Image (tube, rainbow, N blue to C red):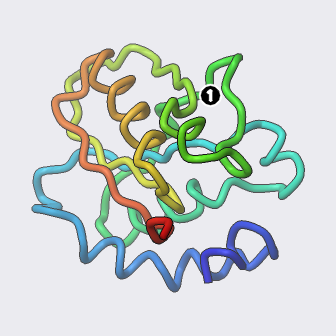
């Protein structure tokens, strides 16, 4: 289902996956906003949408929370897909704009492989004043071997 969302324009899959993600949230009443780990501009141009954004918006709707774009890819950031494990561990670079208060953030991604994308996104949000960041993904790639 996630492959369809990412690569086959199956945008409806976000609404199917969102309830499971929303159920995985620890104490949703302690969150202020939902955001996503944005994919690269090239991927958005190719697909016409960002799968993680679709998931984040669907989850936010279920939780009754606002969904805001809080992260942007750094200029030297490249897509994670196609990279080997050691290259993925470096993770993409994210830039977060300074926050006007100290929100408690739910950060959504479509797939986690090494955790580097969510780790880097959470780090960028915490660096600009997020009080806390909870990270969730629709799925994880199985460990090699």
Left or right: 19 as drawn, with respect to 12: left
Q: Is 63 above or below relative to 91?
A: below
In front here: 118 or 106? 118
Q: Is 105 above or below relative to 9?
A: above
Residue at x-position 50% and y-position 66%: 144
Residue at x-position 49% and y-position 56%: 113
Q: Residues within 10 Å of mark 1 (few under 14, many from 20)?
A: some
The image quarter in which residue 79 lies: top right
**Percent from the top left, x then y, of residue 128?**
32, 16
Residue 128 seen in the figure: yes
Residue 138 seen in the figure: no
In front here: 54 or 100? 54
Left or right: 124 as drawn, with respect to 72: left
**Percent from the top left, x then y, of residue 73?**
62, 28
In front here: 21 or 117? 117
Instruction: Return the residue at label 1.
Output: 73
**Percent from the top left, x then y, of residue 44?**
78, 47
Q: Secondary structure at mark 1?
A: strand
Q: Quadrant of the N terminus?
A: bottom right
**Percent from the top left, x then y, of residue 107?**
37, 47
Residue at x-position 54% and y-position 38%: 86
């Amino acid at each position: 289902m996630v492959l369809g969302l990412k690569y086959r324009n199956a945008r409806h899959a976000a609404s199917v996956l969102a309830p499971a993600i929303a159920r995985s949230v620890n104490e949703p009443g302690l969150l202020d906003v939902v955001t996503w780990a944005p994919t690269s501009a090239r991927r958005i141009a190719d697909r016409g949408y960002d799968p993680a954004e679709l998931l984040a918006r669907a989850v936010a709707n279920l939780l009754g929370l606002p969904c805001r774009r809080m992260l942007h890819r750094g200029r030297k950031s490249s897509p994670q897909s196609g990279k080997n494990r050691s290259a993925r561990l470096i993770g993409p670079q994210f830039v977060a704009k300074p926050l006007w208060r100290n929100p408690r953030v739910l950060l959504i991604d479509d797939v986690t492989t090494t955790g580097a994308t969510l780790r880097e996104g959470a780090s960028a949000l915490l660096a600009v004043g997020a009080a806390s960041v909870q990270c969730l993904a629709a799925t994880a790639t199985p460990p090699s071997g």
